[in-house]
Image (tube, coloured by chain):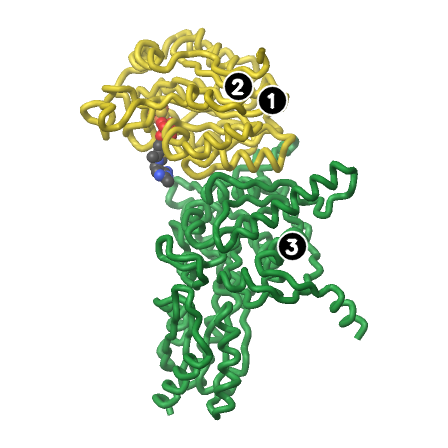
Chain colours: A green, B yellow
Amino acid sequence: MKKNLENKIEKILIKGNDAVVEAALRSGLNGFFGYPITPASEIIEGFAKAYYEDLERKKKGLKPKYPEFQVFLQMESEIASINAALGGAATGKRVLTASSSPGISLKQEGISYIAGCELPVAIIDVMRGGPGLGNIAPEQGDYFQTVKGGGHGDYRLITLAPNSVQELAEFTCEIFELADKYRNPAVLLYDGYLGQMKEGVIFPKVKAKNYDRSSWAADGNKKGREKHIITSIYIAPEDMEKHKLRLKRKYDLIEEKEVRFENYKSDDADIVIVAYGIVSRIAKDVVEKARKEGIKVGLLRPITLWPFPKKEISQIADNAKAILTVELNMLGQMNEDVLISANGKCPVEFYGRCGGVIPKEKEILEKILEINRKVK
Amino acid sequence: MKKKNLEYILKSPKVEAFQNKTHYCPGCGHGILHKLLGDAMDELGIKDITIFIDSVGCSVFAYNYFDCDHIQVPHGRAPAVATAVKRLRPDKIVITYQGDGDLAAIGTAEIIHAANRGENITIIFVNNAIYGMTGGQLAPTTLIKQKSTTTPRGRFATEFGYPLKICEMLNTLKAPAYLERVALYDPLHIKKAKEAVKKALRMQIKGKGFSLVEVLSHCPTNWKMTPEESMKFVKEKMEKYYPLKIFRDREFKK
Ligand SMILES: Cc1ncc(C[n+]2csc(CCOP(=O)(O)OP(=O)(O)O)c2C)c(N)n1
Ligand code: SF4
């Protein structure tokens, strides 16, 4: 009871993108490098505000609020931003870059290098409409470029997909920890709705683990040790293969240990909706409405998009009569992974709205009724 | 290679920062430049606190030759990487080593903005008027009428514009602290080049801001010349278009 009271006091009403900034700063962020883009601009502005307010405090002889936050810099492009993040991480610092879809496209070469160099870089993608300039309305069109590796070469990005402002705060802290734990880039992927939405948040008490990066970082502390080389080049085919097989073992370990999902009433369900991010919240209401109509519907919400909850969806495909994937895109990007996981064991249908149009509960419910008639 | 140059290279006071024989073609300017940069690092005693940014080009393996920490980065992006490295590790020495394709074509945005912000880093810019690593294609610095594999009849301004003068361009900016162009075609110029590199590093050590040394270098392999001919080409052709001089020296500000 007392604990609850304490928590209540700490709960603050905050916009999604602002919650990300606050959580990153509480995670001991050392450097932020970015370039403005809607609907992610509050993030770069938030870091600027925190940085210059602390400078003022220091000038007045006061203690800075975020003593670890050393560098804020608006760069000349997303390309420069991701490479600055590469540099910061290579020297053993905790760094972050944030953007929205077109900006993430530009970062892809850098992300590939970061994966190849095995650097702990945290990346935020607030998805907007595409292809091309598209629009600034929310979509889930970046599943492919994040989960399937938008850059060159085969590599994996740890990808977390929150569905509330509370989770935005929590998962921001998480991507730093996961990036450090596995020396791998980690992405927080969410649609513009979540970024712009205001909700109550209790910020997690962050206990940032003290990762010792001095054994590998190019930190310029070479006295008494061999030089440290951060690189992704392995000219001899045998060496390259060895390096990649090591990466593969790491990816296998992540797949084994880090899968996260939310299972909402899908154990006894005949039809299971698979949805992530903002869509999963609508889907939850659909589950309730459908159950009132006498149809047993459940929801499986992937929280990690990679590693993907393959096993869980496979089990659902064993027991349910059908799966319905709902996404904010037209191709059914995540649905490809749902199909692979279900492996033909039950019918998988897709319902998508795009361009910033959000599916209404009624639409999804109609789709459920239609599937129900088919599989009865 | 001229005997005198060889003597300079062999006659090293102490060899610490610069390690091993290089993978460069015989007579290549990169080898001479590596040696003198290593010497400058030794004389300044900075190798243990240096973070070296290796770009994409023939010098991508520079990390094999300099005894300091290294970060190998994407083509053209070294100044952006160096910016973050220096700002997060302000007590370290940060050097980027970039070719003319890397710095003056794909990485033009990064170099201009790093210079314009006056980042306290040192750029070693190797202008050999060609893309060495990829086999001799046109560089933004290729001279008018000079042949490359993508300008088999020579570079014409009507198609490819004029060779970019990086020092002159950066000299229009207010922030840079030190800009000098040097060459490597004889022992005297090699010595001058070393002084320039050392000066640039000293600027960084003193916290003066952005320093860049443009080094006119020779690529006998892709110019399809002997080493002697290639040095003559730098002296007689390149230097005419790219004058050797100090463009900016913050220490001698009036
Ligand atoms: C994004 C990207 N584009 C193209 C290349 C291929 N590439 C490698 S080195 C290079 C140019 C090298 O020329 P320069 O920078 O002048 O250095 P040099 O080899 O002459 O020393 C190119 C185009 C690449 N590695 N990455
Ligand atoms: S190709 Fe040219 S620049 Fe590259 S190592 Fe050979 S001579 Fe030097």
Quadrant location of the N terminus of chain A in the rendered image? bottom right
Q: Residue at x 46, y 56 (%)?
A: A156
Above/below status of B187 relative to A348: above
The amino acid type found where label 2 is placed reads Tyr
Residues under numbered marks 3 and 1 in contact, where contact means CB atoms less than 8 Å apart: no
The amino acid type found where label 3 is placed reads Glu
Q: Which residue is mark 1?
A: B208
User: How far is mark 2 from mark 3, CA to CA?
Assistant: 40 Å
The amino acid type found where label 1 is placed reads Lys
Residue at mark 2 shares a chain with residue at mark 1: yes
Q: Residue A31, percent across and down?
A: 60, 44
Disc number at residue B178? 2
Q: Is residue A183 visible?
A: no
Q: Residue at x 41, y 36 (%)?
A: B75
Q: Residue A235, percent across and down?
A: 39, 40
Above/below status of A102 relative to B107: below
Above/below status of B162 relative to A363: above
Query: Foreground mark, 2 or 3?
Result: 3
Determine the chain carrying the residue at label 3: A
Q: Residue at x 60, y 59 (%)?
A: A174
Q: Which residue is mark 3?
A: A22
Quadrant location of the C terminus of chain A in the rendered image? bottom left
Instruction: Label 3: state its secondary structure.
Output: helix
Instruction: Label 1: state its secondary structure.
Output: loop
Residues under numbered marks 2 and 1 in contact, where contact means CB atoms less than 8 Å apart: yes
Q: Is residue B163 visible?
A: yes
Q: Residue at x 61, y 33 (%)?
A: A220
Near mark 2 (Cα within 10 A), the count class, few <14, some 14-19 or many ≥20, is many
Determine the chain carrying the residue at label 2: B
